Amino acid sequence: MFNLLCLGALLSNGEWLVAIDASFARKSRRTSYGLDWFWNGSQGQAERGLEIAMPALVDVTHNTAYTLSAYQPPALPKAPRVSTVPKEVSEKDEAKAAEGDEEQPKAKNQC
């Protein structure tokens, strides 16, 4: 908030936009606050580590960015474990079931 107050006089002039920069930090310990899976742009994949997000005001006229704050997002709550995973029925399973129905002898009509 302090940074935004300091920029008050500058905001009346020029062209401005808001940007956010999310930085990834690789972390191997299990007890760090915010440890979770985040996108690592330099590796092009999600990795386990920490993320720091920094919203900023960008002065397009002077090609300058002013960071407003730094924020570490918390880890997402863990999803509950599912005791059993339902079996997916494949096309082969359906075809086998259909073949089994055709092979059974049909009962004769008794009148």
Image: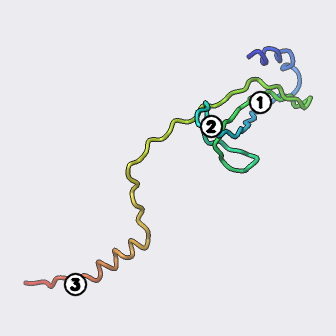
Q: Few, some or many C-alpha atoms within 10 Å of disc 3 (few <14, some 14-19, many ≥20)?
A: few
- 51 shown above or below 4: below
Q: What's the image's color scheme?
A: rainbow
Q: Please tell me whether mark 2 sits on a helix, a strand or a loop.
A: loop
Residue displayed at 65% across by 40% down: 28
- Looking at the image, how many numbered discs can be counted on the residues? 3
- Determine whether label 1 and label 3 are within 8 Å by CB: no
Identified by mark 3, the residue type is: Pro
Residue extending furthest right?
62
Residue displayed at 38% across by 52% down: 84
Identified by mark 1, the residue type is: Val
Residue on which the image places disc 1? 18
Between 12 and 50, which is closer to the camera in this rendering? 50
- 7 shown above or below 40: above
Q: Please tell me whether mark 1 sits on a helix, a strand or a loop.
A: strand
Indicate which disc, 1 or 2, sits on the residue closer to the N terminus.
1
Residue on which the image places disc 2? 29
1 or 2: mark nearer the eye: 2
Give the image location of residue 81, x and y in percent.
Answer: 43, 45
Between 70 and 5, which is closer to the camera in this rendering? 70
3 or 2: mark nearer the eye: 2
Q: Quadrant of the C terminus?
A: bottom left
Residue on which the image places disc 3? 105
Which quarter of the figure has residue 51? top right
